[in-house]
Image: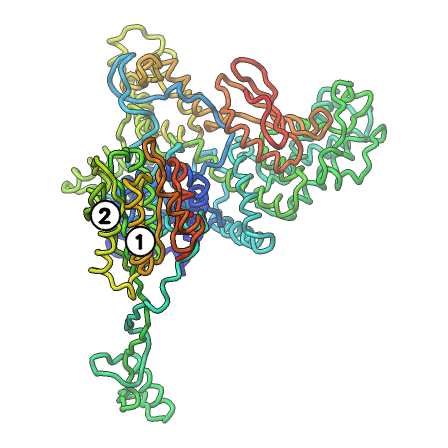
Amino acid sequence: MSELEKTKPLSGELLDLQRVICKYATDYGLNFYEVIFELCDYETVNILAAQGGFPTRYPHWRFGMEYDQFSKGYAYGVQKIYEMVINTDPCYAYLLNANYLVDQKTVMAHVYGHADFFKNNCWFANTNRRMMDTMANHRSKIRRYMEKYGADEVEQFIDKVLSLENLLDVHELFETPELKRERKDIDKLAKEEKQKGPDDDRSEALRSFMRSPYYKDKDGKGGGGVGGGGSGKKDKGKHKKHEHQNSDSNATTTATPTTTTAATSTDPQVQGPNHEGEGSRSEARGQQIQKLPSLPQRDIMSFLAEYAPINEWQSDVISILREEAYYFLPQRMTKIMNEGWASYWHSKLLTEKALFASEITDFADHHAGIMQMSRKQLNPYKLGIELFRDIEFRWNTGRYGKEYNDCSDLRQKENWDLRKGEGAAKIFEVRSSHNDITFIDEYLTPEFCERQQIFTYKFNPRSGRYEIDTRDFQAIKLKLLTSLTNFGSPLIEVADANFANRGEMLLHHHHDGVDLDLNYAQETMRNIWAIWRRPVNLRSKYDNKEILFTFNGKEMNPLG
Amino acid sequence: MDHPIKRDHARFRKIIKGKIRENLRKYVSSNDMIIPKGPKRFAIPVPHIEIPHFRFGDRSQGGMGQGKGQAGDAVDGQPGDSSDGQAGQSPGSKDVEVDLTLEELAQILGEELELPNIEPKGRHQIESQKDRYTTIGVIGPESLRHFKRTFRESLKRQLITDTYDFKNPVIVPSKEDFRYKSAHTKVEYENSAVVIYMMDVSGSMGDEQKEIVRTESFWINLWLKHQYKNIEIRYIIHDATAKEVDEEVFFRTRESGGTLISSAFLLCKDIIKKDYDINEWNVYPFHFSDGDNWSLDDTKLCLELLEKDLLPAANMFCYGQVESRYGSGQFFKDLSERYGERSDKVILSKIKNKEGILDSIKDFLGKGK
């Protein structure tokens, strides 16, 4: 920990407490990386919270803004941060020194819940557990760029890139160096196979699959930048791309001069003409210059880092921000589960083990505060903990499966109990293998919704107020899932980097019923345009009509 | 050393201020008068800086909640204003309340209008000395002895002279070892100013006119307070007769009847004579009216008073004429005939409507006097 943070390790009573809670947590089967608690004052907690829990971040006003909010929130008693924990190995967690002892207990137990979740949930499997160092590196890199190219210049560029922060591909979370290597091997195999010619004994389908653009695309994406390996990364990417262009263009055709590699990265216009529609992909004619990207690419940040006509430092800045965005992505995708799981465990550990009789009222008060239900929005803590408890109960009593579902006798259903006792094992399994979407999809039941009094509401223009719309299970579930799909962001991908053969970018929005906010879209496209430096197009739907929006540097047309 | 986030924070505030700067014109003429509450601070809501993202539009489709009620029942309150005490990362389009001190606001005003700093009347500055104990000296009273420094000096001396005994590390300070906290004297210049507002409250000055005067005087006060350490503000209202009033009354009174501007000038003169030594005070008389004076004779009297008594005492005399349906605006003409529209001492400004306030402030304060 940096000296500036003024955090200090636990000692005395709190240290003893930590050991006790840790023991209870382990006894219940929680499994986590070592958790290091640090004690700090509210000022420090505010700073850390503003920086997403990390002691160092790159210099940017957004952290100042967050800090402003947190410290005012605290000063005026609007909000208070009880607990903060970051997903690293070892796990760092912070305790506010002014909290009551019973609160500290609760926080510790809660933190162990999070720590267990970080370690075991599959969506976190590939997160960088040394993010603390990585963040510090990012800081020094960006500072260096600022010294070299000017703070304003770099900050402006960061602002633009932050516009793309939510255009992520969740599948990238499972990309590992091994997988990439494996794919490369497969690619190589395909190449060899091609060279062997038609006499090899594998089936045509297999060979064709081996050569499918799927692999090429993935490969072309190149160094996804897991290590954030800045400047080198771009070169690598280029190099790879180049390589597979060669591999595509086996002897037969291709006028692609080797020099395009340089050209493509400075001027997208030069990027190969798009021969789609001429059937150029047919096996017989051999492959022409690849369409870019060969398959639509959701990871827009990495696409721009690689192909936009920008400087190396800019490409590196994109990679840095991209890496951080992907680091936080699993947390965005598992908010309900993560908080639910941690709350489940603080509740269990405290009520069953750690609380003294004298502390129960305070704990109950505090816990009730966290679980507060709201008529205006669902509280992820509440929803999560109740779902985990419901799952535990259902698997303990055997209320799942065909037999239970088909039972039409309500009384029998009410008292259903097969004494299976599988609850504990089940919730551990759930916490390992789900994210919020699959969690809700799989375990939200009509009975649960009814018990939790969940409803959807909407605006009634006639009465000028928000009114309860329905308590229908399917409607609730649909609404909840919709709000969680693609972590709540519109699904947008790069469809073509040489749209209309003019080097323009074409983005495709997978419209799932909700239109985009056009003002925001225009400003976002302005930022992409500033990076891509050619017009940016967006194919989407508005008012049930297919529309192609074009941003030409000034404004978006049509404006909708 | 400060935490780096302070720099981020400062940067954020600067950006926010920039936003205010852009919107300043609109802001000043808005009806929300900002009156300082509490000791010094007040809050101005400014938009949260939101980096644009692709996002879904039309959220009026509503949301989800928990609780009792049937379809059609109201969900109390509006969605989005979460009052949960948790550290949520729930994104929202909340406005950030950014505190500005009056000081900062004055700075923004100064920068936006490019107001020059005021050069106080040179010889009328009051010097005041302030002692701050920031240094160390070799003489001083025992009560200010600096133990640590003294100890260090003796230790140094004993080590150098090799009289330090490791086995018996007793330090005996001698006279030259003693160190004392010592004061550093700083000279601070104090300058004082008095602002005397005179307002015509005769029947022709309507509420709108007074609102303009009120807003304008708020900003003028703000700037002068920023420039002077010690400032006094006096208020005079007049119709055919003048009287001194407090701030509250100044802004609320509505009288009727005729207008004799000289009455106000006369009272102003008396106030200056009685309470302010013009060698020590920077005097700013402001007069606001709709420009209708009762008679030519009175105008003559006014000009005489101005010439003989007010101008010699004042840094400058400011006359703001608020456009009104009834006012003839004659007084402005009379003054400008005498002093010209661009005099240094007598500053004239016409305020057409609320939008004119900023220009008028610039007229008044742009001279740097």
- A317 or A384: nearer the eye? A317
Q: Position of residue B287 (x, y in %)?
A: 31, 47
Query: According to the image, label 2 marks what residue?
Result: B263
Residue B132: quadrant of the picture: bottom left
- Residue at (63, 35) in percent of width and height: A303
Q: Nearer the viewer, residue A112 or B156?
A: B156
The amino acid at mark 2 is: Ser
Name the chain letter of the residue that bears numbered label 2. Answer: B
Q: Residue furthest left?
A: A358
Which residue is the site of mark 1?
B304
Q: Is A368 situated left or right of B157 in this image?
A: left
User: Which percent across, then down, holds residue A512?
Assistant: 51, 18
Quadrant location, the N terminus of chain B = bottom left
Q: Is residue A445 above or below residue A429?
A: above
Mark-to-mark CA distance, 2 and 1: 12 Å
Q: B46 and A489: which one is in front?
A: B46
Q: Regarding mark 2 in the picture, which secondary structure is present there?
A: helix
Around disc 2, counting alpha carbons within 10 Å, would you say few (fewer than 14), some (14 to 19), or many (20 or more)?
many
Q: Nearer the viewer, mark 2 or mark 1?
A: 1
Image coordinates of residue A156 in percent, x first then y, are 55, 44
Please, is residue A399 above or below residue A28 in the view?
Answer: above
> Which residue in the rendered view is the most extreme toward the top?
A408
Within 10 Å of disc 1 (Cα), the crowding (few <14, some 14-19, many 20+) is: few
Q: Which amino acid, by three-letter code, is at mark 1? A: Glu
